[in-house]
Amino acid sequence: MTLYAGWMQLWVMIVCGFLLAGGLGCNRQPTAGKEAPRQEGPARSVRLARVERRPMERVLAVSGTLAAQEQSTLSVKVPGRLQQVFVDIGSNVRQGDVLAQVEPRDYELRVQQAAAAVSQARADLGLPLDGEDDQVDVEQVSAVRQARAVLEEAARNRDRVVALSREGVASTAERDTVESDHTVAKSRLETAREQGRTRLATLRQRRVELEIAHKQLADTALRAPFDGTVQTRPASLGEYMAAGVPVVTVVRVEPLRLRLEVPERDWAVVHTNQLVRVRVEGLTNAISGRIVRLSPAINDANRMLLVEANVPGGGVLRAGLFARAEILVREGDPGLSVPTSVLMVFAGIEKVVTLKEGKSLERVITTGRQGSGWVEVLSGLSEGELVVLNPAGLRTGQSVTVETAPAKSAR
C-alpha cells in the first residue's frame, strides 16, 4: 500500500508540473463566462461580380420519344407462294419499288380466262373478238334485226288480210290468224331487244372481271408506298402467304417525328412553329426542330397534352430513342443572373458569398435557367448586389479585401 501511494504522489507531481508549464496550476480554474479570443486568418483578396438583369430565353423542359415520320406494314393483297423477296432489314427503297413477288402464274391464267369471256360476250353482240370499244346499238344486233323483219312481214300480211276481209274475200278466221302472228312478231322483237341489252350488260360485266384479273395479277408484286427504309422483314422466301399477312415494314425517318408530353399546367404556352432543342443519349450536341402538330385534347389518363415536332434525323438519330427536349416559349425574357463561377453547391444546396462589413457571408440562393457562363437567380439575391467570384475555400466571417469592384452594368 505504501508503494502504491508513492507512485500516485509521483504521478500528481508530474501532471502539476505540466500544468504549471502551460500557465495553469493544479487548483486553477478558467474564469466563468469568458471565451478565448478567436484567431482569424489573414484577409483574402477577392474579385466581385454584380447581380444584374439580362434578357434570356424562357424554355419548357419536357421528355418524349422519337418515332418514324411514316411507318407502314405491307402485306400481300392476294394469296400465293412468295417467289422472290428483293429487300432486307436496312434496305433503302423508293416509292413504287417492287419489294416482294408472289408467284404470278395462277393470276396470269385468270387474266386469259377473263379475256376469253370478254371475246365471247363481244361475239354475242356482233362485235369483233378483239377490241376495246364496247359501244353498240341494240337495234343493230342481229337478233333484233331479224325479229324486226319478221314483225314487218307480219304487219304486211295483216294489212292485206284486213283489206280482203273488208271486200268479203278473206274470212274472219284468216283475219284472226294474221292478227295473232303480228302480235307474236311484235313480242319477239321486244324479247330480242331485251336479249340485246342483257348481252351488252354481260359484256360490261366480263370487262370488269378482266380488269379485276389484271388487278390481282398486278397485286402479286408488293410495292413500296413511299421513300424509306425497311425496318423488319418477317416473311421468308418460298412461304405461302395468305392475304393480309405482313411481309415487310417500311419506315420513313427523315424527318423524324418527336412526340412530347406537356403537363396540363403548361399547355397554354405551347404553340405550333415553336423551336425545340432535342438531346438524346450518346450525342453531345442538341438538334433543333419545330412544333408542327398539337393534340386537340388533353389525355384523360395522364393529364398531358401530346405535342409533335419534326426533327431532322441526319442519319444520326433513330426512331425509338428517348429524348429530352426544351421548347422555346419566349425569347428575351428578362431575369436576374450571376456568373456561374460564383456558385458553391454542397449536398444539393446552392450558395454564394457576399460581403458584409468587410467580411464574407454565405447566402443560400435558388437558380433557374442557365446560359453560357451565367445562371439565373430566382431567389436569395437582389439586383445590384455584389457576390464573390471563385469563393472556394472562403469561410463565413473571414476578412476579405476587394481587388476591383465591378462597375454598374449598362444592361
Image: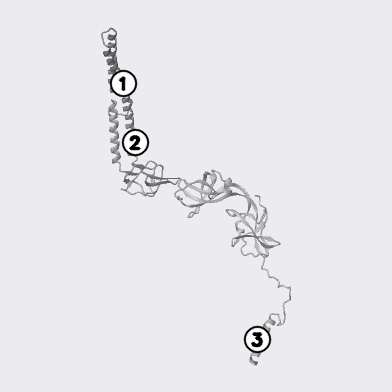
Spatial CA distance of label 1 from label 2 is 37 Å
- Marks 2 and 3 in Cβ contact (< 8 Å): no
On screen, residue 89 versus residue 163, left or right, reads: right
Q: Amino acid at mark 3?
A: Trp
Is residue 402 depicted above or below 172 in this figure? below
Q: Which residue is label 2 attached to?
A: 212
- For label 3, the SS is helix
> Is the residue marked by circle 2 packed among few (<14), some (14-19), or many (20+) residues within 10 Å?
some
Spatial CA distance of label 2 from label 3 is 120 Å
Front residue of 137/156: it is 156
At a point 66% along the width and 90% down the height, the residue shown is 5
Q: Which residue is label 3 attached to?
A: 11
- For label 1, the SS is helix
Q: Which residue is label 1 attached to?
A: 187
Which of pointers 2 and 3 lies earlier in the amino acid sequence? Answer: 3
| Marks 1, 3: nearer the viewer | 1
